[in-house]
Amino acid sequence: MIESYREGVLVNPYERLNEEQVKWLDEASLSILADPGVWCYNERAAKLFQNHGAKVSEEKVTGTTCWRVSFPAGLVREAVAKAPSRLVLGARKPENRLLLDAQVPRVYFGSGSEANVWIETELQEFVSMNNGDEKIRVPRFKQLRGTTALLSRAAHLCEQLDNLDFFIRPLNIQDKEINQDNHDVNKFFASLNNITKHVQAGLTSLDKLPDVVRMAEIIAGGPEALRKNPLISFITCVFKSPLQMVADTADKVFAIVESGLPLVISSSPQGGSSAPIQEAGMVAQINAESLAGITLTQLIQEGAPVLYGSVPVRARLDDLHDLYGCPEFNQYNIDCVQLARYYRVPSYSTAGVGDAKVPGMQAMFEKLLTHLYMGMSGAQYVHYAFGLLDRTNSFCPLQAVLDDEQVGKVKHCLRAPKVNPDEVQDVLKMVKKVMASSHRLYARHARKAMHSGDISSPYRFEAKGMEDKVIENALAYMAELEARPADRIDGALQEQIFKEVPGILPTLKTV
Amino acid sequence: MDKQELLEKIAFNVVQGRVEAEDEGFDPGLEGQPAVTELVEQALEQGIDPKEIVLASLTESMEQVGEKFERNEYLIPDMLASAECVGAAMDILSPHLMKAGVESKGKFVIATVSGDLHDIGKNIVAIMLKGAGYNIIDLGTDVSPERIVQAVKEHQAPYVGLSALLTTTMRVMGEVVSKLKEEGLRDQVKVLVGGAPLSDQFAKEIGADAYCKDAFHAIDSLKSMAA
């Protein structure tokens, strides 16, 4: 399909559900899609479903027209089977492309969400009241509103993070010059001009899709080149849980599929409010929503490149906010990954969101709990994995740097075991050699593995003394990363983009 | 291969940490090519002065290795590989050097004290000191104070290194120092101690001459003792 692409990590997937349980959930989802079915608020989608055999009836729900769609199981099964199991997500640099294959558990980790708040960190020195010579440096945090400049900074930083495989704009741009009409072109340009990895975002205005696509075509080298190397793709949350297909998002699904670019069909029900909190109920419902969304894409265009998206979360039962760093989050998500594998559609999954509001031990715990577990799942595309805090409300660049180190260690941990006849022969030879030596030390024989990168390095931000200096060390490393020059879009192409694509803020031009 | 080329090749292989032809080096693609052992033998066959081999090929290259370690370019396994190269070269060169009246930097008796079987640290120190030009007399693990003192006496060693990993066995080091005093040897021998539970303070308490936190520290301590 393509020769060069990011390595990600090829894992031996951990499966929580057995085959029978996968089938029960599949049947439960199809049963939900048949009865009670879906409340579809998009007429075009409803008609399309009807034309392919769904039972559709029109009704008024609180004054709005709604089409109740009951899907026959065969319609869903046939449509989902037409979704490609392999697809390429392109990038400005060919080596940064991603190859997603539903049957190959190669895991990629990337950023995500569209947080309103950027968290800046600075260290302040405090002196002990008991001993004036005793000083400590403590991180203090400042909240800033997301802007195009900060989104550019996030993209540039994410370009430098070795373990970040793709970029979903993590920040909502709220400059005073940004409005509904120029939101899309600015968020895509700010991202694409600062990162050479795959860029993905939601679409704010349907009528701006042609401008965004034109921008990407100019960068890729033309319309055909863009379809071969789709360096952008889109997220569509076409379902408002429970089971309601949203009118304007469904329109966006039509337009994106017709543009020939990849898209994610995602849904994010909350267990305990917009979905059952019980594992079987949550997964059966979100799976039903994803299947209906994928069905829509394949009825619009057979073979349309689509990812099976799932962001099931659990409600906190004290305030009904989302709760990410909990066992149920992992359980829901890994089940969805297994279902996506069952349907042979690449999986867009979730890990690494902190409920914590600032970087620290709570964030570290919550992120590791999900990074490791969801890495083990073998999901092809794991988003939300860098920098998100306060659920998905804040993006913290320092946290993204900390997450990069964590995701790197997780990837290393999940590498395939290097146990094969050649390796065993080498080891037997080594054991004999060392046992015949005077000091019986294997250290010298660690060199090959050490220099080939088989052996991991100690935690990058460790301190040598009796202090925790993780944040201090990570801040210093972040400063190094941010000082690196950006890899911008070629000057002539930038000029062309500014000429052909209206609405991009002049401050974003870097030529 | 002319003399200069051969000396440079030995030095190169020390830096690469290749004892024998079958060893891999730091850089890829060296396996199968003659390494330190083969090259030193070839140098002797060609009549090159062993002292020149030591000075031009071994001493200087170990300094390079030390610098690489300082720059974090090399890690412990690289250092050990290079030190083993020098040790292997010294095994071949020693008889020739002795004939020529050249002595090592001194005899160094080393042991893990009685009750303790841990020898990784002790072995690393032994390899590094051998690579640095000391004549190592390694008594192994679980060695009684009597045997250690006996070895110091027998070899007239100016240095003794004691290792322990356990808080329960480190006290034996104090017994060794006392025993050296009893035997009237304490003034003739420097006692270096090392091991995870030890500290400078403990070394002072038992009357040792130096606490060495690692092999590099041991080499530095010996250098300052000789100065």
Image: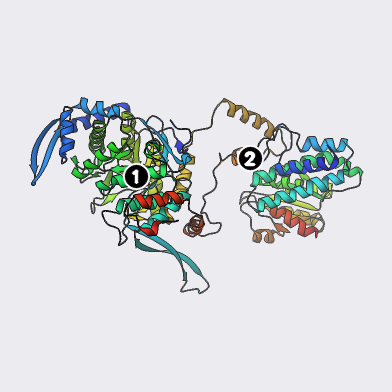
What residue sits 53% from the left and 59% below the top? A466
Q: Which mark is residue B212?
A: none
Name the residue type under label 1. Arg
Q: Position of residue A88 (x, y in %)?
A: 39, 35
Q: Nearer the viewer, residue B141 or B28?
A: B28
Quadrant where the C terminus of chain A lies?
bottom left
Position of residue B101 in the picture relative to residue A87 (left or right): right
Position of residue B145 in the picture relative to residue A462 (left or right): right
Residue position for label 1: A214
Q: Which mark is residue A447?
A: 2
**Residue B133 in view, yes or no:** no
Label 2: chain letter: A
**On screen, B118 above or below A99?**
below
Q: Position of residue B123 (x, y in %)?
A: 69, 44
The kind of secondary structure element at disc 1 is helix
> Do the residues bearing badges 2 and 1 touch, measured as CB atoms within 8 Å?
no
Position of residue A139 in the picture relative to residue A321 (left or right): right
Q: Position of residue B29 (x, y in %)?
A: 67, 35
Name the residue type under label 2. Arg
Q: How many marks?
A: 2
**Residue B59 in view, yes or no:** yes
Q: Which dot, 2 or 1, sits closer to the camera?
A: 1
Do badges 2 and 1 share one subunit?
A: yes
Q: Nearer the viewer, residue B204 or A339?
A: A339
What residue sits 86% from the left and 48% below the top? B103
The kind of secondary structure element at disc 2 is helix
* Residue A292: quadrant of the picture: top left
What residue sits 41% from the left and 42% below the top? A220
**On screen, A286 above or below A317?**
above
